[in-house]
Image (cartoon, rainbow, N blue to C red):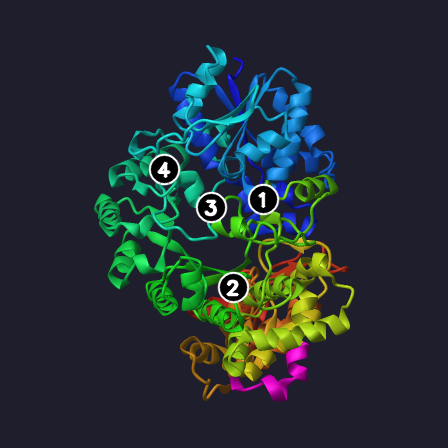
């Protein structure tokens, strides 16, 4: 059957032309995630008797790359448009987000050329905010359906196939002989429970997903000057009933086997009574579903957070934005930063991960404001389950900030991260952005008074690298100097001296390289008299030891062996497992830093290993000296028999038991995946597992776990 409409989900990964960025876990996860907004509309169309299909541009981009055409995004619209048109639909509805809006426009133009008689409809947050401008600039866009379209999209289709009385469709922007016309807004949907479950069956049935998005509510009663939420959902706060949410979770669990959900609503916790009712329903159900949500820090307290944790909440996104009370008032957020810190600490005690989102680059921001924002950033770093984000302000379309500063926007090589975008833009997108700043303002930067734009952009990239790879060194330096801002400025001057060729466009690439971490560690070491104290010394020693261990990663022979550990095999530490020996108790130093105290009594010989997927100090695991010696013996140059001989001398027991003890230890760490075995060049035709006198002893001695 021919679909009545093809809904095209806005792209995420198509913003990223660089291979390293496309390989990023967050980018790929976002690209694979079904777009719940489009699927919700498709479900409403099915209820109305229409036959929709869904086309995901991210999935198409994966195919485009697999065919070897990547990274030519200039040609991607030419490649993908015929595939969209091949659906057979005559109406093509494009969803929109700010970061990929230029590409959406270019693809829509190609679709119109491939199917000249088709109808091109835009919707979603970005198109809703710049509806008149889009219709005036791009004649191939026929209609824009603004805001919540659950009921208005079926009405629009009815007019397309009927009398075409488009002036009757609420929320529609369209053209007539006099130019773009804007119908009155559609009323908000008061009862969200009447909306059907999103049409996940049109998007691969959540195949391979680890969690599902579920819309919990709409509308935000607040009016932050930088936020565009009110333009789309307006300020009418609504949530679905606990019974409806539980029914949706059960349906998805039954159909797709998923029991973890990300609840979509900017401000779930605004109405405390509804949060309590939802949590109590989750607890009473006994289903054990897990879920995450977004919240304001002034709309939760210790008691509510504890209830949410018991009800299955496994993560909260907090939009704190500014660290100073002055900036909080200016941007109409009006949070108490001290209360925000307390809330993050409470979530940490309850074992709930948090994301703390902050913004720098407000035109009114001064030096003290930025320092206080970075104080909140580092406070988040001090909580192991918390993950801070620093975004550079973007003038999102239709927001008070974009209207106030529309004549002072500047287009740079690398723009803001408030709308997640790639390291660079292709020429066609960039030309659209340059020609139509009123349609694509989010790619521009606003005047900043604290520091120049290049420094501000580098601060963001530096902090991202530091928080992921140098978390506790960053905390220690901030504590020692009073602000990480001073450290950054000194580091940037040094970085410009050793890498003057790294321009704004290349910053993100540089800070994703391991080399940036090592160069920063060497920089701090060179300024240790200025920056150093006990905590900084401990963290530096750890990172230096890790760098040396990584540099000495064993060379692996070919021919990995499976099964039992044989005496003639070559023993090698598993990939990603490094071992270090320190004169510092790193965990004790971290425990002091969590509390904001000077580490004391941390001098002690300790041994550590990293995990296969761990990241620096965050993944260090303390091991015994004996396990350290065993892993050190498996250096890729010894057979298991030779490693046993080296290791046997570390056992304090009778001579006849030493080799047995060494063999058992190697077998144990092999079973845990810490070491691997490879073929030797001169390998016997028939080889037995560890045997001989040790095997005889093994049969005669009781088994003990080691």
* Secondary element type, mark 2: loop
Residue positioned 65% across, 22% down in the render = 112
User: Label 1 neighbourhood size at 10 Å, few (<14), some (14-19), many (20+)?
Assistant: many
Return the residue nearer the eye: 214 or 609. Answer: 214
Instruction: Identify the mark at residue 243; answer none if there is no mark.
Output: none
Of circles 2 and 4, the one toward us is 2
Mark 3 to mark 1 CA distance (whole Å): 14 Å
Mark 2 to mark 4 CA distance (whole Å): 48 Å
Instruction: Identify the mark at residue 228; answer none if there is no mark.
Output: 3
The relative height of residue 226 versus residue 478 in the rendered view (above or below) is above
Of circles 3 and 2, the one toward us is 2
User: How far from the left and from the top, in percent, is residue 402?
Assistant: 53, 49
Mark 2 or mark 1: which comes first in sequence? 1
User: How far from the left and from the top, in percent, is residue 370?
Assistant: 52, 69
Which residue in the protein does label 1 denote?
A: 99
Mark 2 or mark 4: which comes first in sequence? 4
* Secondary element type, mark 4: helix
Which residue in the protein does label 2 denote?
A: 364
Mark 3 to mark 2 CA distance (whole Å): 19 Å
């Amino acid at each position: 059957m021919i679909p009545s409409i093809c809904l095209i989900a806005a792209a995420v990964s198509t913003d990223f032309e660089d291979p390293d960025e496309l390989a990023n876990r967050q980018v790929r996860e976002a690209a694979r995630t079904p777009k719940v907004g489009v699927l919700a509309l498709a479900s409403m169309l099915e209820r109305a008797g229409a036959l929709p299909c869904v086309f995901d541009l991210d999935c198409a981009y994966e195919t485009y790359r697999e065919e070897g055409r990547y990274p030519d995004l200039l040609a991607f619209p030419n490649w993908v448009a015929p595939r969209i048109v091949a659906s057979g639909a005559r109406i093509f509805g494009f969803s929109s987000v700010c970061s990929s809006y230029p590409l959406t426009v270019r693809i829509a133009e190609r679709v119109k050329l491939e199917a000249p008689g088709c109808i091109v409809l835009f919707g979603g947050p970005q198109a809703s905010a710049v509806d008149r401008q889009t219709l005036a600039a791009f004649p191939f866009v026929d209609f824009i359906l603004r805001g919540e379209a659950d009921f208005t999209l079926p009405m629009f289709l009815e007019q397309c196939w009927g009398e075409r009385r488009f002036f009757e469709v609420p929320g529609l922007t369209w053209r007539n002989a006099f130019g773009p016309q804007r119908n009155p807004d559609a009323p908000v949907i008061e009862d969200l429970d009447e909306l059907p479950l999103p049409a996940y069956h049109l998007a691969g049935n959540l195949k391979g997903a680890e969690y599902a998005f579920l819309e919990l509510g709409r509308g935000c009663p607040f009016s932050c000057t930088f936020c565009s939420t009110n333009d789309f959902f307006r300020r009418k706060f609504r949530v679905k009933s606990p019974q409806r949410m539980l029914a949706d979770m059960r349906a998805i669990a039954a159909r797709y086997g998923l029991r973890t959900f990300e609840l979509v609503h900017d401000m779930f916790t605004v109405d405390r009574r509804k949060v309590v009712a939802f949590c109590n329903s989750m607890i009473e159900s006994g289903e054990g579903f897990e879920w995450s949500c977004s919240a304001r820090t002034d709309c939760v307290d210790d008691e509510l957070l504890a209830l949410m944790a018991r009800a299955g909440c496994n993560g909260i996104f907090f939009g704190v934005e500014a660290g100073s009370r002055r900036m909080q008032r200016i941007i109409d957020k009006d949070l108490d930063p001290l209360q925000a810190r307390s809330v993050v600490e409470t979530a940490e005690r309850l074992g709930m991960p948090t994301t703390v989102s902050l913004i720098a680059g407000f035109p009114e921001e001064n030096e003290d404001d930025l320092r206080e924002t970075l104080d909140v950033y580092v406070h988040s770093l001090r909580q192991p389950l918390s993950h801070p984000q620093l975004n550079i302000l973007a003038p999102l379309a239709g927001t008070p900030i974009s209207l106030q500063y529309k004549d002072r926007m500047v287009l740079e090589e690398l723009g803001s991260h408030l709308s997640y975008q790639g390291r660079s833009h292709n020429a066609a997108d960039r030309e659209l952005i340059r020609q139509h700043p009123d349609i694509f303002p989010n790619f521009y930067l606003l005047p900043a008074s604290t520091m120049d734009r290049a420094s501000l952009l580098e601060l963001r990239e530096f902090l991202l690298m530091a928080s992921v790879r140098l978390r506790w060194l960053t905390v220690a330096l901030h504590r020692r100097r009073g602000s990480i801002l001073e450290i950054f400025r000194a580091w940037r001057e040094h970085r410009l001296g050793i890498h003057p060729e790294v321009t704004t466009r290349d910053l993100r690439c540089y800070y994703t390289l391991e080399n940036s971490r090592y160069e920063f560690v060497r920089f701090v070491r060179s300024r240790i008299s200025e920056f150093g104290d006990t905590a900084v010394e401990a963290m530096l020693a750890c990172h230096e030891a890790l760098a040396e261990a990584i540099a000495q990663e064993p060379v692996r022979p070919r021919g990995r062996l499976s099964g039992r550990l044989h005496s003639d095999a070559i023993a090698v530490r598993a990939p990603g497992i490094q071992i270090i020996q320190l004169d510092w108790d790193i965990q004790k130093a971290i425990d002091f830093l969590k509390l904001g105290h000077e580490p004391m009594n941390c001098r002690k010989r300790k041994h550590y290993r990293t995990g296969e997927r761990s990241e620096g100090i965050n993944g260090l695991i303390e091991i015994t000296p004996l396990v350290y010696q065993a892993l050190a013996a498996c250096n890729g140059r010894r057979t298991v028999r030779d490693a046993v001989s080296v290791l046997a001398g570390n056992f304090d027991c009778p001579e006849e038991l030493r080799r047995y003890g060494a063999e058992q230890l190697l077998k144990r760490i092999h079973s845990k995946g810490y070491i691997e075995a490879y073929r030797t060049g001169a390998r016997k035709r028939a080889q037995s597992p560890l045997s001989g006198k040790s095997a005889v002893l093994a049969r005669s001695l009781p088994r003990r776990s080691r």
